[in-house]
Image: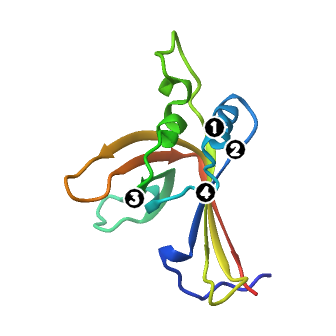
Amino acid sequence: MPSANTHVFTGLDGAISVAVESGPEGDAAKAVNDAYGLTPVGRATGVTVQVTSDMKPFHELGQRYATELRPGNVNISGSIARAHVNGALLKLMLGEGAGGTRPAGAFVSPSFNLSLRLENQGFPGNSATVTVHGVKLDGWSYDMPEDDFVLEQVTFRALWISGADTSA
């Protein structure tokens, strides 16, 4: 059984990469990944991943506290802020819908896996990786402030999540 990683990380230790699976949605994401080289995703300034599990309390008559908590649906969402605005994330969200012309009909929504890897260079071989599977971008925004960096931000939803630690 591998031992748990006990080292701390900062954003400086992180790398974000996009991986795709075969199929129409994965092929659409692969086309964007190949065109823009999103492995690693560069100039990211912030990444959040949130996992929520709906908990349903059962209350008995005459009891003020719940007797049991039943797990419900699990939802995975997050966001990425990026200071390199080149259309890649917008195309990763809309696929053909972000092309030079308006699509005539329905189009495929790209789907991909997002890998967030942390490795402290002071302790090589010790890393933590979170992989968010079946990611689809569901929001894109563009901020052009007067006196600060131009940023784009995407929000996403995902099907499931996994984590892995390695230690030397």
Tell me the SS state at disc 4.
strand
Q: Look at the numbered discs 2 and 1 and tell me whether their residues touch, using CB distance below 8 Å.
A: yes
Image-quadrant location for residue 166: bottom right
Amino acid marked by disc 1: Ala
Q: Which residue is mark 1?
A: 29
Q: Earlier in the sequence, mark 4 or mark 1?
A: 1
N-term-proximal mark, 3 vs 1: 1
* Residue 37 spot, x, y in % from top left: 63, 48
The residue that mark 4 highlights is: 161
Whether residue 75 is situated above or below residue 120 in the rendered picture = above
**SS assignment at label 3:** strand
Q: CA distance from mark 4 to mark 1?
A: 19 Å
Which amino acid lies under the numbered mark 3 shown in the image of this protein? Answer: Pro
Give the distance between the C-alpha atoms of the residues marked 4 and 2, in whole angstroms. Answer: 15 Å
- Mark 1 crowdedness (10 Å alpha carbons): few <14, some 14-19, many ≥20: many
Q: Residue 14: give x, y in percent of width and height.
A: 56, 70
In this view of the protein, which residue sits in the foreground, 53 or 81?
81
The residue mark sitting in front, 3 or 4, is: 4
- Quarter of the picture containing the C terminus is bottom right
Residue at 56% x, 55% y: name it.
41
The amino acid on which the numbered mark 4 sits, given as a three-letter code, is Ile
Alpha carbon separation for disc pair 2 and 1: 7 Å
Instruction: Name the element at disc 2.
Output: loop
